Image (cartoon, rainbow, N blue to C red):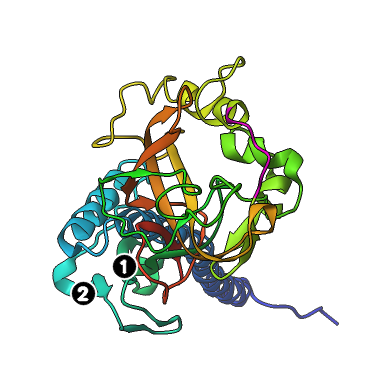
């Protein structure tokens, strides 16, 4: 009996059907691969853009926050920083439009959402940046692109705690910006009833071996800075027995050339004046503004009510009356603890709060 099989025409038709099915699956697979490419490449672009937008918003807000409460100056600084950072963002371009609400300000007694109440001398601002991202593969799926937006909120507020130069000045004195002040308090007209302390404080850590290093403020080990951190309302005691020659070596001149006034002659501070100085000039000292509670000598106690920043103009260690003359300045201190409800004393910190 002859063997039966498919005729050549039927066999060809079956092969064509199989090829058609394979082609369908290839198309489906290509669409899936393109979808995966869109997910990996385009989502990767979105992630990078989001980080860049956040970095630019952070830089703009932190830089502009130093200019508060001047809204005009702060806004100008923020926009300039956004533009400046666009030059090194690897193809991304951030935008920030005040007219569209991308810069928001808060003032005295306002409440910042998720942060809290601002006192009479604290201000806040939020900077929002946007980065448009054009998709590479997703247009195949009908998706053209997206815009990433990120914000940063900062508060400029009075300092609430800080490592200090271990001196004290009278809290009751009226301090006026730019006015020269005598920074040696005791045995003077302000504090004639506190004999023996001469305006110095015992280091908060209780370790008097670190006193001159704190006064000098040069390369103080981090652990000593932390150990001698003080806050508003802390109570400190007087440091006695300090000869003029000792504090002069920390503030005025020293054999190793590392006293504050010696270092003020280094670059980049050589040409600094009170009207124009670098933020880290060694002439700048942070001093607790204290209320005398009682006691004499090393038993004298002082309560810290605020902190003041002073630019040292001159130091007289040669003949009585000795003096340290400084000008009261406004100063923004990075990294300090802030208190949005504290009074205004010219010493500020700018903190990122959102």
Task: Classify mark 2: helix, strand or loop.
Answer: loop
Mark number, residue 347:
none
Residue 221 relative to residue 137: left or right: right
| Residue 350 sits in quarter | bottom left
| Residue 170 sits in quarter | bottom left
Residue at the extreme right of the image, as rendered = 1
Mark number, residue 101:
2
The 10 Å Cα crowd at callout 2, few under 14, some 14 to 19, many 20 or more, is: few
Q: Quadrant of the N terminus?
A: bottom right
> In x, y percent, where is residue 278?
36, 35
| Residue 108 sits in quarter | bottom left
Q: Residue at x 33, y 48 (%)?
A: 328
Q: Which residue is mark 1?
A: 128
Q: Residue at x 31, y 64 (%)?
A: 129
Question: Which one is in front, 142 or 109?
Answer: 109
Q: Main secondary structure of the magenta part?
A: loop
Residue 195 within the magenta-colored segment of the rendering: no
- Contact between marks 1 and 2 (CB within 8 A): the answer is yes
Question: Which one is in front, 169 or 58?
Answer: 169
Residue 129 seen in the current view:
yes
Residue at the extreme top of the image, as rendered = 255
């Amino acid at each position: 009996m002859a063997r039966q099989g498919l005729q050549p025409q039927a066999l060809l038709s079956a092969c064509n059907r199989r090829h058609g099915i394979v082609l369908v699956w290839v198309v489906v697979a290509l669409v899936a691969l393109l979808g995966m490419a869109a997910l990996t490449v385009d989502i990767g672009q979105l992630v990078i853009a989001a980080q860049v937008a956040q970095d630019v918003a952070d830089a703009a807000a932190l830089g502009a926050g130093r200019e508060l409460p001047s809204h005009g100056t702060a806004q100008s600084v923020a926009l300039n920083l956004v533009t400046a950072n666009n030059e090194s963002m690897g193809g991304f371009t951030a935008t920030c439009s005040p007219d569209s609400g991308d810069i928001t300000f808060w003032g005295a007694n306002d409440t910042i959402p998720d942060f809290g109440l601002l006192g009479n001398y604290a201000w806040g601002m939020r900077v929002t940046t946007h980065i448009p991202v054009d998709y590479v593969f997703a247009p195949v799926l009908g998706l053209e692109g997206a815009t990433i937006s990120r914000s940063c909120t900062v508060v400029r507020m009075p300092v609430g705690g800080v490592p200090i130069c271990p001196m004290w000045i009278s809290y009751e004195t009226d301090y006026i910006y730019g006015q020269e002040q005598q920074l040696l308090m005791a045995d003077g007209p302000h504090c004639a009833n506190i004999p023996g302390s001469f305006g110095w404080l015992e280091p908060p850590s209780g370790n008097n071996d670190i006193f001159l290093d704190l006064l000098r403020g040069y390369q103080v080990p981090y652990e000593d800075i932390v150990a001698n951190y003080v806050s508003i309302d802390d109570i400190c005691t007087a440091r006695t027995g300090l000869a003029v020659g000792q504090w002069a070596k920390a503030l005025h001149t020293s054999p190793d050339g590392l006293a504050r006034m010696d270092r003020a002659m280094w670059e980049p501070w050589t040409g600094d004046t009170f009207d124009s100085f670098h933020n880290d000039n060694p002439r700048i000292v942070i001093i607790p503004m204290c209320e005398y509670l009682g006691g004499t000598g090393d038993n004298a106690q002082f309560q810290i009510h605020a902190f003041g920043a002073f630019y040292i103009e001159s130091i007289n260690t040669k003949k009585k009356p000795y003096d340290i003359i400084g000008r009261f300045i406004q100063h923004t201190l990075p990294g300090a603890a802030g208190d949005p409800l504290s009074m205004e004393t010219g010493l500020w910190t700018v903190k990122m709060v959102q």
